[in-house]
Image: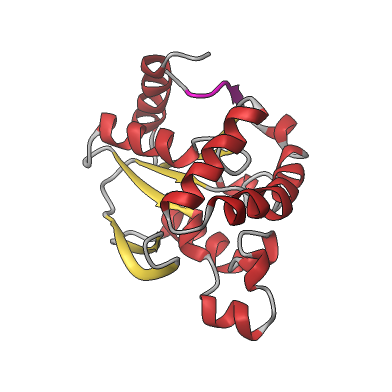
Amino acid sequence: MTDFAELLAAAGRLADAGPRQILGITGPPGAGKSTLAERLVAGLGPERAVLVGMDGFHLADAELRRTGRRSRKGAPDTFDRAGYAALLARLRREPGTVYAPAFDRSVEDSVTAAVPVPAGVPLVVTEGNYLLLWPEIRPLLDEVWYLDPPADARRAALVARHVAYGKAPDQAERWVAESDERNAELIAAGRQLADRVLGWPAG
């Protein structure tokens, strides 16, 4: 297990490397990506780092229902993949503040222009499932860390998360088995492309 202080120091070195660096954190559903990303950004402070999640690029539930994909929400084709790539490219080249969307789990939908990324912030931390699956994304990231938790602990965390956000326990277990685990298999194929492979939880 990697100590969190070591990871924070590594993220700090990226922030100091200049020009703006983008750190990707990926891994299967329930691996703790958002938790680690949030801790890193909080540890570095708002003047040095900002968090931009890939989940802000979920297609809206209305669109998923229209196209018959609501039951597979979280699968690769239920995201605005091109929009996410375009945002990462903008974060590299645009001189002013760039606004990113955020995902609100309480309503299971995205909120546009919710995250300001000021020009002077030297590190963007982005986290999401498919950073190493989509080939156009990897060149836009300076480093990628892959979280590789024990499968049983990860699945238990996922079930607990789904229950916390309103699913009945049997529905949560079925969603994990039929949706999240299929996505986890896809994500694992990119593990070897990561700069670091980390245990879970970190620190």
Instruction: Measuring from the top left, give residue 74's x and y in whole percent.
Output: 61, 59
At x 34%, y 62%, the residue is 98
Residue 75 vertical position relative to residue 139 in the rendered view, above or below: below
Residue 182 vertical position relative to residue 35 in the rendered view, above or below: below
In this picture, residue 188 sits left or right of residue 10? right
- Is residue 23 visible in the rendered image? The answer is no
At x 22%, y 42%, the residue is 46
Q: Nearer the viewer, residue 175 or 99?
A: 175
- Is residue 151 visible in the rendered image? The answer is yes
Instruction: Measuring from the top left, give residue 123's x and y in whole percent.
Output: 37, 40
The part of the chain drawn in magenta is 196-201
At x 76%, y 47%, the residue is 186
Residue 44: quarter of image: top left
Outermost residue on the bottom side: it is 66
At x 27%, y 29%, the residue is 43
Q: Quadrant of the C terminus?
A: top left
In this picture, residue 10 sits left or right of residue 135? left
Instruction: Measuring from the top left, give residue 21's x and y in whole percent.
Output: 43, 40
Magenta span contains residue 93: no
Instruction: Measuring from the top left, give residue 167's x and y in whole percent.
Output: 50, 58
Residue 128 vertical position relative to residue 151 in the rendered view, above or below: below
